[in-house]
C-alpha cells in the first residue's frame, strides 16, 4: 500500500518533506511495538505523539481525562490531567522542554503512564498533595486502527496532499475497563474505582490552529464502545469512527452533528450524532453534558478552544457515559 502512495506522489510531481516521508513509509499496519514512543530521529513540523485515557465513574462521582503529548520538532511536551471529584475539577499541567525522546515512562514526577501488556493493559498513576490515584485500564475490545480502514489513495484524492502537513496521523483507539483506587488525602477516604473508560494513541502531524472545528467522542455502554471524529479543516470535512462489540469492530463512514449550546454560542449543552457505518446502517447517539471543562490553547497563529465534556449518552434505548470533545479555532 505504501508503494502505491509513493507512486501516486511521484506521478503527480508532488515532493513531500523527507521527515514527513518517514511517517508515510511506516505504512498502516500496527504491532505491539507501536504502543511505545516513535523516535524518527528527525521530526517534521507539527509533529505530535500522544497517549490519552479517560474514565467516568458516576457511582463514585469521580471522572478523569488525561493526555501526554510530545512535540519533538518544537522540543516540548505537554502532560495534562483533569481529575473531577464530587463536581470539583482539579487540573494538573506540566510543559517541560525536551531535547531528546524520553527513554522511560516515569517521565513526570506526578503523572505516569505504564504499558504493562501491549494492546491489552495500561496503568495510570497520579499523585499530588490532595489525591493519590492508581488505575489499571484493561481492554474490553481489540484496538481499532483507523488507517487500516481507509484507502490512502482515495484519501489523498478526496482531501488533498496538503492535509499531510496538518493531520497525517497514525491513530488507534480502544474501549477499556478502569479499576483501581482514589485516595483523598485530607480525609483518608479511599474510593474503589470500577467503571468503563477509553484510550487512544496517535502520532504524526497535527496543526491545531488550522483545524476549524473538531468533534470527538468516546461513548461507553455495557455492550459496546462508540468512537467518532468529525474534523473540519482546510475547507474539507473528515468523518470517521467505529463501533466495538463482542462481535468485533465496524467502521463508521459518516457523521452528522447538531449541537445545542449555551448563550455564548460555543459551550455545548447537548448534541445529536447521526452515524452511518460501512454497511449503511444508521445509529443515533445523543449526548447531554454533565460537566464541561474549557481548555484554551493559544498559539502564534490564533487560538484554539477545547471543551472537554463529561456526558451521559443515550443510544437505542440504552444509557451510557463518556467524553464528548468539541474544538473550535480562530486565526489571526
Image: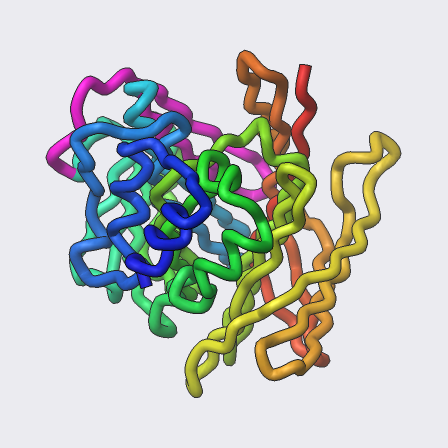
Q: Position of residue 101 (x, y in %)?
A: 18, 29
Q: Nearer the viewer, residue 46 or 131?
A: 46
User: Residue at point 75% right, 56% down?
Assistant: 257
View extreme (left): residue: 103
Q: Position of residue 259 (x, y in %)?
A: 79, 50
Q: Quadrant of residue 274?
A: bottom right
Q: Quadrant of residue 117?
A: bottom left
Q: Is residue 176 visible?
A: no
Q: Position of residue 74 (x, y in %)?
A: 33, 19
Q: Quadrant of residue 266?
A: top right
Q: Position of residue 151 (x, y in %)?
A: 46, 65
Query: Does the stretch in magenta take in 96?
Result: yes
User: Residue at point 88% right, 34% down?
Assistant: 263
User: Residue at point 31% right, 23% down?
Assistant: 73
Q: Is residue 141 visible?
A: yes
Query: Does the stretch in magenta take in 290?
Result: no
Image side of residue 55 versus residue 25, left or right: right
Quarter of the picture containing the N terminus is: bottom left
View extreme (bottom): residue: 247
Image side of residue 151 versus residue 295, left or right: left
View extreme (right): residue: 263
Q: Nearer the viewer, residue 68 or 190?
A: 68
User: Residue at point 35% right, 20% down?
Assistant: 95
Image side of residue 164 versus residue 158, left or right: left
The residue stretch that appears in magenta: 76-104
Amino acid at each position: 500500500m505504501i508503494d502505491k502512495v509513493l507512486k501516486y506522489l511521484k506521478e503527480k510531481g508532488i515532493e513531500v518533506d523527507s521527515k514527513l516521508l518517514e511517517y508515510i513509509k511506516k505504512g498502516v499496519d500496527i504491532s505491539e511495538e507501536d504502543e511505545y514512543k516513535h523516535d524518527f530521529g528527525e521530526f517534521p513540523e507539527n509533529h505530535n505523539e500522544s497517549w490519552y485515557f479517560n474514565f467516568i465513574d458516576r457511582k463514585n462521582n469521580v471522572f478523569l481525562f488525561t493526555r501526554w503529548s510530545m512535540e519533538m520538532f518544537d522540543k516540548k511536551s505537554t502532560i495534562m490531567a483533569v481529575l473531577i471529584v464530587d463536581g470539583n475539577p482539579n487540573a494538573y499541567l506540566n510543559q517541560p522542554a525536551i531535547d531528546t525522546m524520553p527513554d522511560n515512562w516515569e517521565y513526570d514526577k506526578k503523572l505516569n503512564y505504564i504499558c504493562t501488556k501491549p494492546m491489552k493493559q495500561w496503568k495510570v498513576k497520579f499523585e499530588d498533595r490532595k489525591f493519590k490515584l492508581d488505575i489499571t485500564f484493561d481492554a474490553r475490545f481489540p484496538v481499532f486502527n483507523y488507517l487500516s480502514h481507509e484507502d490512502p489513495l482515495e484519501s489523498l484524492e478526496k482531501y488533498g496532499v496538503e492535509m499531510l502537513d496538518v493531520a497525517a496521523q497514525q491513530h488507534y483507539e480502544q474501549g477499556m475497563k478502569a479499576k483501581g483506587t482514589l485516595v483523598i488525602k485530607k480525609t483518608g477516604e479511599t474510593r474503589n474505582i470500577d467503571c468503563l473508560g477509553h484510550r487512544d494513541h496517535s502520532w504524526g502531524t497535527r496543526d491545531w490552529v488550522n483545524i476549524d472545528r473538531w468533534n470527538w467522542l468516546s461513548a461507553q455502554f455495557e455492550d459496546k464502545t462508540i468512537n467518532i471524529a468529525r474534523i473540519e479543516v482546510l475547507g474539507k470535512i473528515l468523518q470517521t469512527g467505529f463501533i466495538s462489540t463482542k462481535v468485533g469492530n465496524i467502521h463508521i463512514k459518516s457523521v452528522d452533528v447538531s449541537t445545542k449550546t449555551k448563550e455564548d454560542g460555543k459551550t455545548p449543552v447537548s448534541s445529536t450524532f447521526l452515524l452511518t457505518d460501512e454497511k449503511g446502517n444508521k445509529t443515533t447517539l445523543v449526548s447531554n453534558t454533565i460537566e464541561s471543562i474549557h481548555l484554551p490553547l493559544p498559539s502564534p497563529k490564533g487560538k484554539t478552544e477545547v471543551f472537554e465534556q463529561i456526558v451521559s449518552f443515550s443510544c437505542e434505548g440504552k444509557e451510557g457515559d463518556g467524553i464528548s470533545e468539541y474544538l473550535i479555532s480562530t486565526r489571526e
